């Protein structure tokens, strides 16, 4: 076997250009698979970090248009679409927030509303989202400040015009100046900057470009409303999250005079459900990308088969000589099959290295953008790459190898 391997290596090295071109399709395909799975692992680490920042032991309540209304089909389930189509659910209020706190497994909760306005400081201005929330947010949310402080419950009750800025917005408005204590113009109001968040690693970048203000300020001075769009609930025992979610649903149906689940004007979602939804979507995208990479692998395999047929033709006389001095069909088959496998294994190794390198580059770019992105090359990605390489080498190398093995030695010796 060692002699066959040595002879195959000699045959491949004799024509380096052809060997390189033969392996190129395999290299690209394997590199794509490694890159997709590596980037997928990095993206999952980003999602996990964001979930941890919001608290893994939290539930999410969002208003929605009931499924029985005609608008639901057009608006979807989220508050942004509802607002865009002029459909606003205003039933989620402070009474709900306070009564949810009384559920045994609930530790804390906070409400939130959103809007948009232009923030300006001197000659600098930027259109930015605002998040109005109760002060309990800062007891649940794990994001930390770069400087300053959070607003207090007393400032929320008093509708104080104070603001915490996202890191990017603070940089855009103040450049190198210290923003703490300074006044910014936001919408039609002046706000004193009391804090600046550290970069939050949000993939959309929205959180870093936002203004965070007290709930009562957002409701009464910015929006003119008395309801909430979202509520975040912190639970004591995450294992009882589904039970707690059901208790919240029953409470909200009672408060909102809802008689059947089909008429719910809210959604209660656990972190596990949110992650399951993400995993389903991301799994589909991953399969699609791997399928695209598979096309490249198939093309590479066909290329190997065609090249091996050319090699058989070029080495017909050599094959005839070997068979004339005693080489069996099995020996010839083994030699050409080994060459095909070596080409694909070489392509697999180079593809793994290239894919890992590209995955590392992606992680550097993501980290430089402020995302909590881990560089990972999953073991299953390497195992898959090796298995696919070997399979392609054997699968697409069998026919040319069999063709070489079946050559008649006399006819082969006459071939020119």
Image: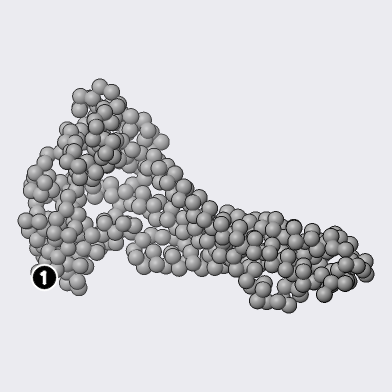
Left or right of 254? Residue 316 is right
Q: Position of residue 152 (x, y in %)?
A: 15, 50
The C terminus lies in quadrant: bottom right
Give the secondary structure at mark 1. loop
Q: Is residue 12 visible?
A: yes
Q: Nearer the viewer, residue 77 or 231?
A: 77
Say which residue appears at 20% left-offset and 42% top-offset.
85
Instruction: Name the residue at the right extreme.
Output: 325
Left or right of 286? Residue 319 is right
In the rendered image, which quarter is residue 392 located in?
A: bottom right
Say which residue appears at 52% left-offset and 61% top-offset.
32
Say which residue appears at 24% left-offset and 63% top-offset.
167
Q: Position of residue 6 (x, y in %)?
A: 79, 71
Left or right of 203? Residue 310 is right
In the rendered image, which quarter is residue 81 located in?
A: top left
How dense is the environment of label 1, judged by Cα within 10 Å: few (below 14), some, or many (20 and up)?
Answer: few
Q: Position of residue 63 (x, y in %)?
A: 24, 37
Say which residue appears at 38% left-offset and 60% top-offset.
372
Q: How many circles with numbers are drawn on the protein?
A: 1
Q: Nearer the viewer, residue 158 or 86?
A: 86
Picture colour scheme: one colour
- Give above or below for 267 relative to 168: above
Q: Is residue 110 visible?
A: no
- Give above or below for 95 relative to 175: above
The residue that mark 1 highlights is 123
The N terminus lies in quadrant: bottom right
Left or right of 42? Residue 115 is left
In the rendered image, which quarter is residue 149 located in?
A: bottom left
Q: Position of residue 324 (x, y in %)?
A: 92, 68
Q: Nearer the viewer, residue 269 or 336?
A: 336
């Amino acid at each position: 076997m060692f002699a066959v391997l040595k002879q195959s290596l000699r045959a491949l090295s004799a024509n380096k250009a052809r060997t390189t071109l033969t392996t190129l399709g395999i290299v690209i395909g394997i590199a794509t698979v490694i890159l997709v799975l590596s980037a997928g692992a990095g993206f999952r680490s980003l999602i996990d970090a964001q979930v941890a920042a919001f608290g893994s032991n939290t539930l999410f309540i969002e208003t929605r248009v009931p499924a029985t209304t005609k608008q639901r089909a057009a608006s979807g389930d989220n508050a942004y679409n509802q607002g865009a189509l002029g459909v606003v659910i205003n039933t989620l209020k402070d009474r709900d927030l306070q009564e949810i706190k009384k559920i045994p497994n609930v530790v804390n909760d906070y409400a939130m509303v959103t809007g948009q306005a232009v923030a300006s400081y001197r000659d600098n201005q930027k259109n930015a989202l605002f998040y109005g929330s109760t002060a309990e947010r800062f007891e649940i949310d794990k994001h930390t400040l770069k400087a300053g402080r959070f607003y207090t419950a007393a400032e929320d009750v008093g509708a104080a015009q104070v603001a915490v800025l996202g890191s990017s917005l603070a940089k855009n408005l103040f450049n190198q100046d210290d923003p703490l204590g300074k006044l910014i113009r936001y919408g039609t109001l002046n706000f004193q900057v009391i804090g600046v968040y550290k970069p939050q690693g949000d993939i959309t970048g929205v959180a870093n470009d936002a203004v965070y203000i007290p709930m009562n300020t957002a409701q009464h001075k910015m929006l003119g409303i008395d309801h909430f769009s979202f509520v975040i609930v912190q639970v004591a025992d995450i294992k009882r999250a589904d039970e707690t979610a059901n208790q919240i649903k029953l409470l909200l149906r009672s408060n909102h005079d809802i008689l059947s689940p089909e008429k719910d004007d809210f959604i209660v979602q656990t972190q596990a459900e949110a992650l399951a939804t993400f995993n389903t979507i991301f799994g589909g995208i991953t399969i699609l990308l791997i399928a695209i990479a598979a096309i490249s692998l198939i093309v590479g395999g066909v290329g190997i088969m065609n090249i091996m047929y050319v090699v058989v033709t070029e080495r017909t006389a050599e094959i005839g000589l070997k068979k004339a001095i005693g080489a069996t069909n099995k020996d010839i088959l083994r030699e050409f099959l080994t060459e095909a496998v070596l080409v694909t294994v070489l392509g697999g190794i180079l593809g793994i290295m290239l894919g890992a390198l590209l995955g590392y580059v992606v992680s550097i770019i993501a980290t430089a953008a402020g995302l909590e992105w881990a560089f990972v090359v999953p073991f299953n990605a390497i195992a898959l790459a090796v298995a696919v390489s070997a399979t392609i080498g054997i699968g697409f190398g069998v026919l040319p190898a069999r063709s070489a093995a079946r050559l008649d030695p006399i006819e082969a010796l006459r071939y020119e």
